[in-house]
Amino acid sequence: MTKNLKFKILIFSIFLMLNACGKDFFTFPSARDVPVDSQERIEKNIEEGRGVSFGNALGGGSGGVFDFASSNEMWRASVEVLDFVSFTNASYSGGILITDWFSGNDEDQNSNNRELKITVRFLSNEVRADGIKIIIHEKICLSSNGDCKIQKIKSEISNQIKLAILKKATIYKEENLTKSSKKVKKKRKGVKKNY
């Protein structure tokens, strides 16, 4: 069997399974029924029992935890700290941010020939110093014909970036804790009123 035929069979099988779910699967709600705020949409979908849960079908315990990038304090802080340069790779699921090459220190005479690239590796979702790794690459071009030397360097810049990310992530975490505690208090007040 060719890859193209296998792909067509797979797509057809998925279509048949979805079609077996009933005609409600292919109907779309009115724009008036869908909340604009994403948090309200999530709460509404949870209340209505929407979503997919594979449980233990894929083996191993309770399954993975998949947080959205906007709820991960380390990710948000890294994107904000490095917003002065564009990204060539920003993979939340892969746990990596890679910036584009950008000019180094302007005070240096060779600054026109020197560029830096920053890589941020996320080793944990928790706000911890060992949960993030900053790697700096340096590119020095000695001639205009593109003869460049690229090397990984150890620099104080990586420590400064790491510290800035950790500080901002801590602020985001405190904000999230405050918001969640307010929601819990609000829900508790609502429960007391019902009794």
Image (cartoon, rainbow, N blue to C red):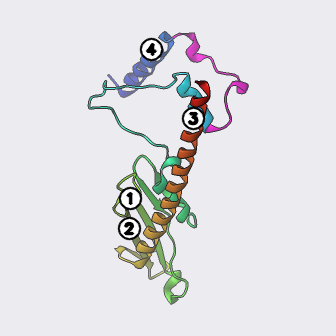
Cα separation between marks 1 and 4? 39 Å
Q: Where are the magenta residues, as a range?
A: 22-38
- Residue 169: percent from left, percent from top: 49, 59
**Mark toward the start of the polypeptide (1 vs 2):** 1
**Mark toward the start of the polypeptide (1 vs 4):** 4
User: Identity of the amino acid at label 3?
Assistant: Lys
Please report contact status of discs 1 and 2: CB closer than 8 Å, yes or no. yes
For the point 33% across and 62% down, the residue is: 130
Give left or right: position of 2 versus 101: left
**Mark toward the start of the polypeptide (1 vs 3):** 1
Please report contact status of discs 4 and 3: CB closer than 8 Å, yes or no. no
Cα separation between marks 3 and 2? 44 Å
Give the labeled residue for mark 1: 121
**Mark toward the start of the polypeptide (4 vs 3):** 4
Of circles 1 and 4, the one toward us is 1
Give the labeled residue for mark 4: 17
**Mark toward the start of the polypeptide (3 vs 2):** 2
Cα separation between marks 1 and 3? 37 Å
In the image, residue 85 sits, relative to residue 153, either above or below, namely above
In the image, residue 89 sits, relative to residue 149, either above or below, namely above
- Residue 156: percent from left, percent from top: 41, 78
- Residue 72: percent from left, percent from top: 47, 50
Cα separation between marks 1 and 2? 8 Å
Please report contact status of discs 1 and 4: CB closer than 8 Å, yes or no. no
Cα separation between marks 2 and 4? 46 Å
Give the labeled residue for mark 3: 187
For the point 46% across and 13% down, the residue is: 16
Assess whether residue 26 is covered by the magenta stretch.
yes
Q: Which mark is residue 135?
A: 2
